[in-house]
């Protein structure tokens, strides 16, 4: 019998494999990964510096241990170059591997900023353990870090780096951080909280060039201002990895298109995690991929199951100003009711009948996220 093949050993690939093994202990399972196959929790990458954690300390298990736990073969440092859905095979270097069912858990690529300058290629991004190890090496050489992007990941790194004793500049094109997720009052509270731990904001601007300097680099902004720095970290967004699927003729939109059973447009090929667009939703977070993994494991072991999304608030890991946010599902006519107090900001998105559809909470107010989440409609019932 041909194995179930999972491409990707991130949280999506390994969580699916664990869920599958709860239901089916024996079907041959092969996990193919371009990286070293260590198991780790990616969210830790943006709050591990202040705790002084190395990449090895973040990893919870090496690939051989994971393989043994999962009764699976884990092929590390193996990049899949081609999928042939008609022949039901994948190609890795010179090897062709047949599958009975194929799962794409390919993750997302960091968006590269468009920059001029002789050091544009020195800009780092941190999207996996190996990136984190390189980043730690670089920041050991200097105290000044410039972060491009004040979204969720940029804000988390800003807090973590300042907590680890670095000087942090953040360049962000909007007039307040996390502008895609938060109403202005909540975003400004976060901005103040991070400024309070030393983060210097450059809002309403983008970086246009990075050049080498006598020590470190010089980042030039669109208004001509220059920032001297030792390391430049880009956190301007992630794009689902769709190329492999597209080349194999699978339907692709923002992500690899799958239905609520996590099936792609090709039979016996599935996708989940950051690479997948599930019934129109691209949600690059842990809770959605766990719901996907449970549903897909049931499907792979013969019980037709559709993924259900409850309301899934996201906690932004910025201890200087904790933030909890639940985005509004789809287009809902309504408005923000914003209450600011010494305990932080409580912003509730309500429709005309005062039904709650989303929220943004900062500071101590973030403590009510679970109670409020219970009042929200499910994202995908
Ligand atoms: C810094 C940071 C902090 C975060 N914090 C949070 C948080 O607090 N809460 C939250 O909910 N979410 C958070 N997220 C998002 C969350 O971590 C991701 O949604 C999740 O880890 C994605 O898992 P994944 O398995 O889909 O992708 P990945 O972890 O990217 O795994 C993709 C895998 O596919 C492999 N691969 C890709 N292409 C190939 C190929 N061609 N051949 C073989 N293998 C291939 C890669 O090697 C890798 O093993 C954070 C993300 C980042 C970057």
Image (cartoon, rainbow, N blue to C red):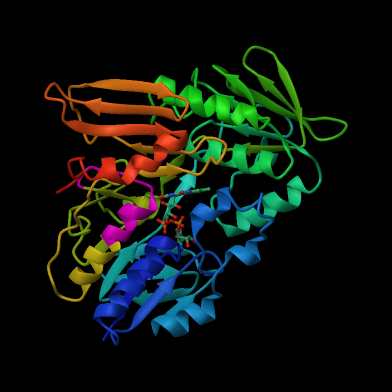
Tell which of 118 and 70 is nearer to you.
Answer: 70
Q: Is residue 285 magenta?
A: yes
From the top left corner, tell me how far across and down residue 201 is, in percent.
62, 23
Say which residue appears at 49% left-offset and 53% top-offset: 43
Tell which of 273 and 40 is nearer to you.
Answer: 40
Picture quadrant of residue 271: bottom left
Q: Is residue 195 above or below residue 371?
A: above
Point out the quarter of the image occupied by ligand 1: bottom left
From the top left corner, tell me how far across and down residue 358 is, in percent.
27, 33
Give the extent of the magenta segment: 279-292
Location of the N terminus by quadrant is bottom left
Q: Is residue 86 above or below residue 349?
A: below
Q: Is residue 240 left or right of residue 189?
A: left
From the top left corner, tell me how far across and down residue 200 is, in percent.
66, 25
The outermost residue toward the right is 214
Picture quadrant of residue 205: top right
Q: Quick check: can you spot residue 200?
A: yes
The outermost residue toward the top is 223
Say which residue appears at 56% left-offset and 32% top-offset: 113
Say which residue appears at 27% left-offset and 40% top-offset: 372
Say which residue appears at 69% left-offset and 53% top-offset: 134
Q: Quick check: can you spot residue 5?
A: no
Q: Is residue 185 magenta?
A: no
Q: Is residue 365 left or right of residue 77?
A: left
From the top left corner, tell me how far across and down residue 166 is, in percent.
73, 39
Q: Is residue 347 above or below residue 61?
A: above
């Amino acid at each position: 019998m041909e194995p179930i093949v999972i491409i990707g050993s991130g949280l999506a690939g390994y969580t699916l494999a664990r869920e599958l093994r709860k239901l089916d202990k024996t079907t041959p399972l092969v996990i193919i990964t371009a990286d070293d196959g260590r198991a780790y929790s990616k969210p830790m990458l943006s709050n591990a510096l202040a705790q002084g954690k190395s990449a090895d300390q973040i990893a919870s298990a090496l690939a051989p241990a994971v393989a043994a736990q999962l009764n699976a073969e884990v092929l590390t440092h193996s990049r899949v170059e081609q999928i042939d859905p008609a022949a039901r095979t994948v190609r890795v270097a010179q090897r062709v591997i047949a599958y009975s069912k194929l799962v794409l858990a390919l993750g997302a690529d960091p968006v590269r900023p468009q920059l001029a300058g002789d050091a544009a290629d020195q800009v780092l991004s941190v999207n996996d353990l190996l990136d984190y190890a390189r980043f730690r090496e670089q920041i050991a050489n200097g105290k000044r870090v410039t972060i491009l992007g004040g979204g969720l990941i940029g804000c988390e790194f800003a807090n973590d780096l300042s907590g680890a004793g670095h000087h942090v500049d953040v360049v962000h094109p909007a007039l307040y951080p996390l502008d895609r997720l938060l109403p202005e009052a909540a975003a400004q509270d976060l901005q103040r909280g991070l400024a309070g731990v030393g983060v210097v904001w450059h809002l309403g601007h983008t970086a246009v060039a990075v050049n080498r300097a006598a020590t470190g680099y010089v980042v030039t902004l669109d208004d001509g201002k220059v920032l001297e720095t030792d390391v430049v970290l880009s956190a301007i967004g992630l794009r689902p990895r769709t190329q492999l699927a597209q080349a194999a003729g699978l339907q692709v939109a923002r992500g690899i298109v799958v239905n609520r059973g996590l099936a792609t447009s090709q039979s016996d090929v599935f996708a989940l995690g950051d690479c997948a667009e599930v019934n129109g939703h691209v949600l690059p977070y842990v809770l959605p991929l766990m719901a996907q993994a449970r549903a897909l494991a049931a499907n792979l072991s013969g019980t037709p199951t559709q993924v259900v999304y409850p309301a899934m608030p996201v906690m932004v890991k910025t201890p200087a100003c904790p933030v909890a946010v639940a985005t509004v599902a789809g287009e809902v006519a309504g408005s923000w009711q914003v209450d600011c107090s010494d305990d932080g900001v409580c912003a509730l998105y309500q429709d005309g009948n005062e039904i709650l559809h989303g929220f943004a909470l900062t500071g101590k107010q973030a403590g009510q996220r679970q109670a409020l989440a219970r009042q929200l409609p499910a994202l995908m019932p």
